[in-house]
Image (tube, grey):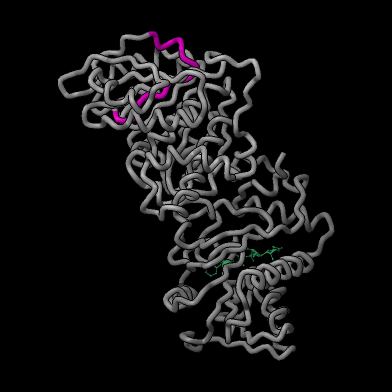
Amino acid sequence: MVALSRSCLVSAQAMEQVESTIFAGGLPVEALMEKAGLRLVQAIERDFALSRYSRIGVLVGPGHNGGDALVVARELLLAGRTVFAYCPRTPAKPLTASHLRYFQSLGGSVSEGEALDGQADLWIDGLFGFGLTRPVTSPYAQIIDRINASGEPIAAIDLPSGLSSDGAVLGTAIRARRTYCLGLWKRGLWQDAALPYLGSAERLDLGIRDSQIQMPIAEHLLLPEMARSYLPLSRPPLAYKYSVGTVLAIAGSHQYSGAPLLVALGARAGGPGMLYLAVPESLPQRLSPELPEAIFYPCPEAANGTIADLPLDLGKFDAVVCGPGLGKIDPKLVERVVGETKGALLLDADALNVLADGLLAALTSRRAPTVLTPHAGEFKRLFGDIDLGDRLTAASEAARRSGAWIVLKGARSVVASPEGSVWVNTGGSSALARGGSGDVLSGLAGALLAQSHNETQKAMLAAVWWHAAAGEWLAGQHTVLGVDPRTLALGLLPFLVAS
Ligand SMILES: NC(=O)C1=CN([C@@H]2O[C@H](COP(=O)(O)OP(=O)(O)OC[C@H]3O[C@@H](n4cnc5c(N)ncnc54)[C@H](O)[C@@H]3O)[C@@H](O)[C@H]2O)[C@@H](O)CC1
Ligand SMILES: [K+]
């Protein structure tokens, strides 16, 4: 079991509660600040070859984030580095003020209003942490914009200043090279909106024990080691093809005649016992050479090249994937799929669009797990009144309303369970921002769902992690331009073997 402190995502308020538990337990705030500062110095020395920098500028804000920064500045000074503190306002918090005095007592130089340009070739951002409560204004906004514009690397303490701990960018924000989050992950760092500011992020452990995290935690990082531990799904020695998962994909149209192949290749990597494809009748002869193992249901076609009927029993599959490339299919067909599928049902792409209004009502009658995999556009059509500014809350609210699992795809995909848990994927690459990547995910997820006997959490967390991590891995080999959906699907298993 992964320690809660490693995976949990907290708001500023939750962090304050944890810190008050720590202080009430007897640790002085000064000690925690000193510990944070020393952890920061270690990490900064590890990540930045400090001897390469001629002048290190430490931005000191009015609160304890500034206090952390001054501990770092003092330790760098004592290590013989050329460092100065830039402190635009007298510190509001006494502890920060005393660290400023001590830094100066050691001969540390402090500057206030001078122009910043060219003053340093490495900046450490201690302006604001999780105490930021309103958009940054003068003089901080100008300082942030000038430092960003300088192009010099910035190491951010706890959060890039200007980013709220819930993820909203309040005005302007530091664009960090590296962000060192203290103690527990602040949830805002994992909203897509934070990505341009975060740089690469690391959590610095401050020795917070799970017992000190007393509030219920609903939001977690989808830690790679946790998702990886789910794969490959266990397979009993006495398996036979029908016992290890049967998955049906309902996909494709004349316009999107390749979608069924992408879904099937994604499913294949997931290792289902049987793979079935319900596609427009003109497609099988093109698809079957690539998919010798697939069993086809050729479906009558409508005038617009979409599936016009589904001549099959939808109740006999462990999992059904419906949506990729369906085009403007008759909504009644999707309603039939929702009504007649007895196993796990994953709805993606056009199945989501076509049912936008009627979908949610239809889902409530289902007993087996349902998974919706919208990207932001599909999400807006389905849940238009839910604000996507906070993707974690949005996915969770949609899951609660629909009673379905929600995979809100994006730079960092969010998985939300109907019971209220949320996971944010840590990986991902813009290499996957291509039509068809989602088809591969739907197929892979469907194959894992077919074998997971209602352990939907395992199947979905494994699928989302696997798909994104494989994409990153492949981008390393083919560049971000070279991960077309077919390369991705064919790379899923080689990635898993290598990881
Ligand atoms: N509380 C603690 O014991 C510890 C806190 N830590 C550090 O302290 C930070 C939290 O410290 P604080 O709660 O003092 O707050 P911050 O240092 O994050 O914010 C500074 C102060 O700025 C003020 N402020 C908020 N928004 C502003 C705005 N837009 N313009 C101007 N001023 C604004 C607030 O009054 C706040 O107290 C954490 O992010 C972390 O870096 C760590 O040292 C660990 C120990
Ligand atoms: K900061």
Residue 385 visible: no
Image quarter hosting the C terminus: top right
x, y percent for residue 336: 34, 14
Image quarter hosting the N terminus: top right
x, y percent for residue 44: 64, 71
Residue placed at 30% from the left, 30% from the top? 325
Report the side of 20 relative to 167 (left or right). right
Residue placed at 76% from the left, 66% from the top? 35
x, y percent for residue 498: 57, 45
Residue placed at 60% from the left, 73% from the top? 48
Of 331 and 464, the residue lying toward us: 464
Toward which corner of the image does residue 110 lie, by quadrant? bottom right
Image mark count: 0
Image: magenta residue range: 313-325
x, y percent for residue 287: 31, 25
Q: Relative to 226, does residue 297 appear above or below in the rendering?
A: above
